[in-house]
Image (spheres, grey):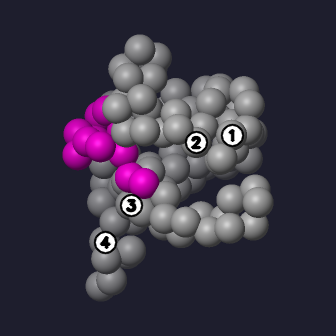
Amino acid sequence: MTAKTLAAAAAVLFTLALPAGAAVDADGATKLAKDSSCTKCHTVDKAKKGPAYQKIAAKFKGKADAEAKLMDYVTRSPKVKLEDGTEEEHAAVKTKDAAQVRNLVQWILAQ
């Protein structure tokens, strides 16, 4: 198994292991986003170096696998193509706590 496959499987397991009805902790999500330097490239409603969280939420709206895909995306470091056409490695969140990551993902998807 490749590292990419293992990361995807871990993200899905994290998602399945956590309670589905938990309320989003916006303060916790924004703190993790700041601590992980997400706000260097993203804001809620305006594009910076990366897309706004609202644009990300719109992209995943109505997709059953949205949470699992975004969990996988923020927990590994894939190459991303930026608005200006350049590519760089997307930084992973700075926590291994699945509940914190899931909260951040749910917060992004709620924008």
Q: Whole-Å distance between the Cαs marked 4 and 3?
A: 10 Å
| Amino acid type shown at disc 4 | Leu
Decide which of tag 2 and tag 1 comes sooner along the chain.
Answer: 2
User: Is the Cβ of the residue at disc 3 closer than 8 Å to that at disc 1?
Assistant: no
Q: Position of residue 8 (x, y in %)?
A: 39, 65
Quadrant into which the C terminus falls: top right
Q: Which residue is mark 3?
A: 76
As drawn, the label of residue 6 is 4
SS under mark 4: helix
Number of other residues with Cα within 10 Å of mark 2, as a class: few under 14, some 14 to 19, many 20 or more: few
Magenta range: 91-101
Disc 2 secondary structure class: loop
**Image coords of residue 86 (percent x, y):** 68, 67
Residue flagged by tag 3: what amino acid is it? Arg
Question: Label 2 sits on what residue type?
Answer: Cys
For label 1, count other residues whose C-alpha is less than 10 Å away and answer few (under 14), some (14-19) or many (20+).
some
- What's the CA distance linking mark 3 and mark 1? 21 Å
* Of labels 2 and 4, the one closer to you: 2
Task: Check contact, mark 2 vs mark 1: CB within 8 A.
Answer: yes
Gap between marks 4 and 1 measured at Cα = 31 Å
In this figure, which residue is indicated by the disc labeled 2? Answer: 41
The answer to whether residue 96 is above or below residue 76 is above
50 falls in the magenta region: no
The residue pinned by badge 1 equals: 48
Q: Residue at x 60, y 37 (%)?
A: 42
SS at circle 1: loop
Give the farthest residue toward the left.
96
Marks 4 and 1 close (CB-CB < 8 Å): no
Q: Is residue 110 above or below residue 52?
A: above
Tell me: residue 24, above or below residue 6.
above
The image position of residue 78, as x and y in percent, is 48, 66
- Cα–Cα span, label 2 and label 4: 27 Å
